[in-house]
Amino acid sequence: MQPTSIQPVRLAVKWLLGLAVGSILVAFAAPLFVESNKSYVWDAELEAFVIREGTFRFRHEGFSNTYIGAHGFAGVDNVNSSDSYALWGDSQVQGLCVNDRWKIANLASTREVGLLPIAKGGDDVVDWYSKIPLAESAFKVKGHFLLVTDLQDMYPNGSDFIAAPDYEIRTKTQTKTDPPRMNSLKANVDRFQLSFVLLAAKNLFFEPRSMQRRKLRFAVGPAPTKQIETIEHSITDVALSDTWKSLMPDLASRSSKPIVIVYCPTVPTIVNNHVSFKDPAENQFQLLSEAALEHGIDTIDLTDRMIESYQESAQFPHGFHNGKLGRGHLNPVGNQIIADAICDYISENR
């Protein structure tokens, strides 16, 4: 009979072997299901940090791979800037949820229209206002299209506007500094296909949505709930009208070339288990459009195109199979509508 002291050793070996085999299997499967880490580099032309060049995997909404080119342009490799227009926006313009062929800029290129997607998640009119002269100097673009999917992106002092309306544009200054150490770590992790390790560590120590530090609690029973006090603010149409009347001349002064606002609301969508074709911000957009036209800034309202597309194809322009249909980011259907509208506008106004 073998000594019983050997049994714990064998058990430990089995556990370690299982851990090693399981980790290897996860490592091979992770590149298919775990998205890349965003690491940033400084772009001298745009005076901002942009996503590092390379292939970026996006998985939590849609299932896609994006090539990040020069200046952080998503899905655009060859930049023929002298014959292109700048397409400004946020994550909707980046389009990381869809493969490159379905991005707005590449769909427009099929009609021989060049668009440079100068966008990053979280950008708004304050960012566009600051960068328009930089883009004209660096890329010699022929004009500017501002894709607005949420009218809050047109507030001149960003997310603080509703609580404290302010007509003055609060420009965001970025100091040229070396990227944080975390950027280098993320780049190296992606290089060796180890994103799943960083993701697991992040989920262990931080809440996935809020990114607040987790409070690791080892106790019996349910966790205590916190009552979070929320303060709701509202803004009147008069205040919005006055704000945009103040904003538009400043925005128009940033360029002698055409500036066009492309409005793409989240319609149709599902409300109470029914398809809704109503844009809650319809009246507010009308105020913005009137203020823009007074200063030579055209607007394109895509509400009707979005609704007509759904009625013809029964496909929502927003949302993905692994998200909420009718909500979230633009899918290939929505991107096609936007690309066609921009191309039509350019063709009609040449």
Image (spheres, helix red, strand yellow):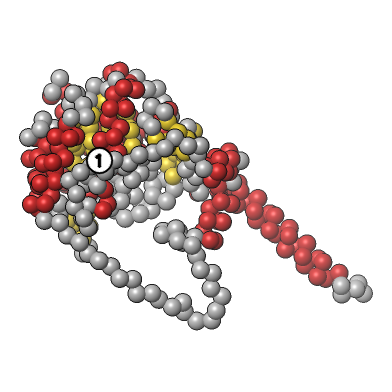
Residue 152 in the figure: left or right of residue 173: left
At x 7% / y 35%, what residue is drawn?
294
Q: Quadrant of residue 343?
A: top left
Within 10 angstroms of label 1, few (less than 14), some, or many (20 or more) residues?
many
Q: Quadrant of residue 96?
A: top left
At x 33% / y 37%, what residue is drawn?
119
Which one is in front, 222 or 5? 222
Q: Is residue 102 above or below residue 325?
A: above
Where is mark 1, residue-wise? Answer: 125
| Residue 138 visible (yes or no) | yes
Name the kind of residue labelled 1 in the image: Val
Give the percent coordinates (x, y) of residue 313. Answer: 21, 44
Which one is in front, 168 or 315? 168
Residue 151 in the figure: left or right of residue 38: left
At x 14% / y 34%, what residue is drawn?
249
SS at badge 1: helix
| Residue 111 visible (yes or no) | no
Residue 318 in the figure: left or right of residue 191: left
Give the percent coordinates (x, y) of residue 328. Answer: 30, 51
